[in-house]
Amino acid sequence: MLSTNSYFDGKVVSIAFETPEGPATSGVMLPGEFTFGTSQNERMIVTAGQLTVRLPGSEEWTAFPAGTEFNITAGDSFDVQIETPTAYLCYYS
């Protein structure tokens, strides 16, 4: 079963689904700057475009272009900057 979520006035839209590895979402982020909180561990894979991310505990921004990934621990938050529409796949554990 699919579930659709929209955040930040429709600038971030995701579709939730189950995989053999567990729950996941696939979505698109439009240009902007957003802060996301986590309730589970997340593995974010950028599939198109680029996310520029300030990871928890860091003051530095790091670019993650298509084909790269990063991990976030449950209970943390992270900031993203998007300059062009960007697609992602996120696995939860």
Image (cartoon, rainbow, N blue to C red):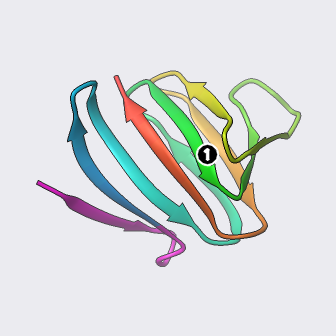
Tell which residue pokes out farthest to the right in this image. 60
Query: Dot 1 corresponds to which residue?
Result: 46
63 vs 10, nearest the viewer: 63
Image coords of residue 50 (percent x, y): 73, 53
In this picture, residue 78 sits left or right of residue 92: right
Place residue 13 in its image quadrant. bottom left
In this picture, residue 71 sits left or right of residue 32: left
Residue depicted at x 34% and y 22%: 93
Q: Is residue 9 magenta?
A: yes
Label 1 sits on a secondary structure element that is strand
Residue depicted at x 21% and y 59%: 3
3 vs 58, nearest the viewer: 3
Q: Which residues are magenta?
A: 1-12
Q: Is residue 75 above or below residue 80?
A: above
Residue depicted at x 38% and y 27%: 40
Q: Is residue 6 magenta?
A: yes
Residue depicted at x 54% and y 37%: 44
Place residue 22 in its image quadrant. top left
